[in-house]
Structures are given as C-alpha cells and as structure tokens.
Amino acid sequence: MAQSNMKVAVQKFGNFLSSMVLPNIGAFIAWGLITALFIPTGFFPNESLAKLVGPMVTYLLPLLIGYTGGKLVHDQRGGVVGAIATMGVIVGAPDTPMFLGAMVMGPLGAYVIKKFDGLIEGKVRAGFEMLVNNFSAGILGGILAILAFLGVGPAVDAFTSLLVEGVDWLVAAGLLPLTSILIEPAKILFLNNAINHGVLSPIGLEQVQQGGKSILFLLEANPGPGLGVLLAFMLFGRGTAKQSAPGAAIIHFLGGIHEIYFPYVLMKPMLFISVILGGMSGVFTLVLLGGGLVSPASPGSIIAITAVTPPEGMAYLANFAAVLVATVVSFVVSAIVLKSSKATDEDIEGATKKMQEMKGKKSSVAGHVSQGTMPEEVNKIVFACDAGMGSSAMGASLLRKKVKAANLDVSVTNTSISNLPSDAQVVITQEELTPRAKNKVPNAYHISVDNFLSSPEYDKLIASLQDGITDEQAEVVEEAEEEAVNAEPNADHDDDLLLEENIFMNQSFATKEEAIRFAGEALVKAGYVEESYVDAMIDREGITSTYMGNNVAIPHGTEDAKKAVIKSGFTVVQVPDGVDFNGEKAKMIFGIAGKDGTHLEILSGIAVVCSEQENVDQMVQAKSAKELKDIINSN
C-alpha cells in the first residue's frame, strides 16, 4: 500500500512538472531556433538578432514556467504572483537560467496567495474587493520576490551547478550511457516527466549556455529505441500487434508521441532489455561523435530533433547516427525476443490497459492501437452520451449529414450509454465515456472524440465506410435511416421549443457552474423542467464536460433526470467574453430539456449551424435575441 501511494505521488509530481513545461515548449523551440540560426556559429550569424538569445533564456522562459506553475495552483491570480516571485530567483542568480527556480517559486507564490484568499474570503467589505485583491497580490508577490532573490536564487544556482558538474563527470568518465538503465524503463512506467522536465531539461539549458548544445536533450527524446521495437513487431509480431505496429511507428517516429509504443513493451516484458540497450547505444554514439541539441525536442520526433540540431561540426551526423544505432540495436534484440516467444496472438489491448494503470492516467494516444477492428460491412453507427439527449444527438446529426453527402446507406442514431443496442457496430463517444461504452458493447468498434462539432474522426470514418460499404445493405438501412431522420416532432410543440424570451444576450459568468445554473433556472422559469433538473445539469457536467467545440456548450441533465422534464425546450445564453469549460471557452450555451425525442429536430439544426465556427462567431456578435434566433434557424 505504501509503495502504491509513493508511486501515485511520484506520478502526480511528474505530471505537475510537465504541466509547467509542456505548454511553453513553443517558446523553448523559438529560442532554440533563434540560437541555431543567429549565434556566431549558427546558420546565418547575425550579431543584432543574436541579442535575443540571452534575454529569452534568462527572463522569458523562466517567467513563462513560473506563471504557468502558478496558474496551475491558483488560476490567473496565482500565475501573476508566481511570475513576480520567479523574477526574484532570476535576478538572484543572473548567470544561471532559473528553470528549477521557476518550478519552485511559481507554484509557491500561487500557494501563498491562494491561502491568503481563503483567509479573507467573505471578510472584505463590499466595494473594496478589487483594492484588496490588487494590493495583496502586489505585497505578497513583492515579499516572495525579495526572499527568492536573497535565498532561493543562490541555492538553486548552487544546486544546478552541482548537477551540471555531475553530468559533466558522467560524460568525462564515459558513464552517461548507463543513464538509459533508468530513463528507458521510467518512460514506459511513470517517471519520464519528472526526469525529463524536472532534471534533464534545466541542466541541458545550462549546458547550452556554456557550450552551445547539450546531449541531455536526447537522452529521453531519442525515438530510436521505440522505433526498433515497433519495426520488430511489423516483421515478427502476430495478430493485432503486428497489424497496428506500422501506424504506431509513423505516429512515434514522425509525430514524436513515444507513448504509442509503451503497450508493445509491456506486452513482452523482455523488451525492456531492447529499449535499454537501444538507449545506451544511442547515448554512446552521441558521446562518441559529439551530438546534442540547442533546446528540448518536444515532441520527440525526428522532425523536432532536426529542427533544434545545431549547425556546427558533426551535430547532424551524430544525432542521426544516434537515432539509427538505437533503432538497429533495439530492433535486433526485439526480433530475438519475438522470434523466441510462444506463437500466441499478442494482447495489445490488455497491454494498453496495463500501461494506463501503471501511468495512473488515461492515454488518449493508446486508443489508436486498442479501439478494435472496423467491421467489413457497417450499417449501424450509434452516438452515445450519458443521457442521450445532448452531445450525442448533435454528433449524430452532423455525421448523418456527412453520411448522406457521401451517398452511404448507413443508419446513424444516438442514445444513452445505458441503452446502447447490442447490435451496434460502430459506437462514438466522448473520450471520458468510451470505457463505459466498451463495457456495454465490447464487440463494437469504438471511436473516441473530444469535439463533437468538428472532430476529424468523422471524416476518417466516412473514408473507411466508403471503402467497405456494399450496396446490398440499402433496403434494411434505409428503413432505419428514415426512422432516425424523419421522426418529426409534434408540430404543436415546434413553436414552443425556442422562444425569444428564452434567449439571454450579453451575459457573463465567473464559472461554468454559474453559467449552467443560469441556463437551468431559465428552463425552470419557462416551464420546461422541474427545479431538481438544475442540480442534475451540474451532476451531468461532473461526468464529462458538455463543451462541444467551436465555443459551444450544451449543458443538460443526467439520464435519471429525464423524469424531471415537463416538456422539451431550449434556453440560449450568449457569453461574449466566454466562460471556462475545462480549459475551453464557451461563448454560446444551449441549455437543453428533451422529452420523447421532440427536441431532436431543432437540436440537429443547432448542431449543423454550430459546426461552422463562422456561424458561432455571428451568434456571439448578434445584438438581439431575434437576430440570434434567425441565425440558428438559418440552416
């Protein structure tokens, strides 16, 4: 139990470190490219433009990390105080890039202001909130900056210097390849983020300041070990693993998503030897030929590695040779392992689940190798969500339109997950709901999407259907299509579904919960639902976000809350400045109450209109309820 708790703690620590660095990788790459291009030994030496290099690595990058770390702890306010505190460590140790210092002071600054806000909550006199907020952030941020300048900056500077000397000693002693014994298994298990972003990148950037490049950026990012494993599966694997390996290799090598090969190694634990030896041989090649990068290569693709390779000396040769050697060694060892193993069909899906359990979180990439096999003949596609009245209905409407445009005879319907039919061939759900859908209909082909309004998975599915659908299905499917598409709602209720008095213009909300309650109360006042439905809308949001993409959210109740629906209806809330839905800005909120399917036709129309960002922008800019309603009805 203690070991499990420690594992979870380390996972969270690694994820937190990566969450500070990964959103700012673009800035790291920009700095790396400017360095590679314009320093005296760059492609196009330019003394003026080279002046950007120092300030970017000294100020810009640490401040971005500090701000991001603070925002993770206490939103925008935490980010501001975190950035102020980070400035103290930057000035306190001007000769060392303060990435480690930023990782300390950013979250610490946010934690302090978060605690302060908790202490004064509800105690500030009305009208003085802004004054107290601004001065508290300024005073506490200033105090933390001074403390960081006097103590944290010099301490982190000394610690970084010690780490750099340790790495230099490993290089000089020829022992750096031994780090692969830790790094390669850690990548597959759970510790890659903590090692890469918490240790290797900060020390590597310090080495870049001294020598123009660092080998450390390639210790974890080298795609060679994983590519060797996937190539071995392509030639010597069996079953699903062999079939999925080519696609995984492309995603891994060109896309830089190393996570894609982790299940293959977990499926055959002896392959840990392959990636370790591959990593060691790659590092040895780098040390021997003098390779390295000018900034982190993230993601770890050959394209990113090429972009941040310095132009001087044999850097390109060394880096490419390291990737090649790591690939060859990993491939040879993997081939031996696979050839000597029992002739059974590799369980890639089971290995994927095992990898997710070990990492302590869901892997969106791993879905590419574990979603099942598309049936040769498809005549039934089902969209599923928790209640079956909102997101799934909109997604089904959009895909139905695409199916019709492609002249395919395929039924597209929607339902709740609990009512998924056993004969569903293709099931489409939001990522968070896919495991539930798989448990309900394990034999179906499952597709996960994160944006029901504009998912690229729709076009991929249409392309697959065009390759496999036969004309013999037409008669049966046509009947199902008519049932799904032509089920007209009661004409008497049509005019009551979306009324101008239920369209609310120019609203603003601090949280999504506040916005959802507003939309829910509007449904109650309009007589569409009972009061209990509002709480069910909040509960539904807790299951998985009702943000649909394209700045649109469609909050609605849970499946159990359908009994609280009096009649079908909509409320529309325009939020020009947007409200945060799990990191996405929702500017148009459609509150939904659906009873007996009578809301589906207008919901289908909303889906079609909102699938184009331009239409959503027009709704956000509309000046009256009538104008907004006309846009909705324009489909």
Image (tube, rainbow, N blue to C red):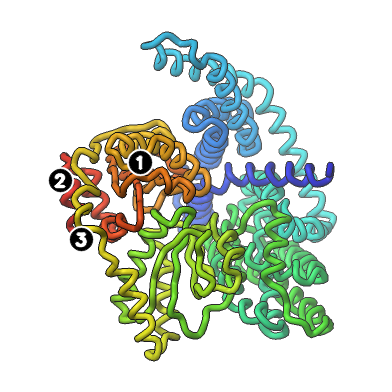
- Residue 386 visible in rendering: yes
**Looking at numbered disc 3 in the image, what kind of residue is underneath it?**
Asn
Contact? badges 2 and 3 (CB < 8 Å): no
Tell me the residue that label 2 is attached to: 627
Q: Which of disc 3 and disc 2 is earlier in sequence? A: 2
**Looking at numbered disc 1 in the image, what kind of residue is underneath it?**
Val
Mark 3 element type: loop
Q: Which of disc 2 and disc 1 is earlier in sequence? A: 1
Q: Observer-nearest residue: 533 or 8?
A: 533
Tell me: 450 left or right of 373: left
Vertical relation: 541 (above or below) 268 = above
Q: Residue at x 35, y 41 (%)?
A: 529
Tell me: 578 left or right of 34: left
**Looking at numbered disc 2 in the image, what kind of residue is underneath it?**
Glu
| Residue 621 drawn at (x, y percent) | 21, 43
Position of the C terminus, as image quadrant, is bottom left
Check disc 3: other Cα within 10 Å, few if <14, some if 14-19, many if 20+: few
Quarter of the image where one finds residue 395: bottom left
Check disc 1: other Cα within 10 Å, few if <14, some if 14-19, many if 20+: many
Mark 2 element type: helix
Contact? badges 1 and 2 (CB < 8 Å): no
Check disc 2: other Cα within 10 Å, few if <14, some if 14-19, many if 20+: some
Q: Residue at x 75, y 66 (%)?
A: 266
Vertical relation: 539 (above or below) 192 = above
| Residue 472 drawn at (x, y percent) | 39, 91
Vertical relation: 551 (above or below) 128 = below
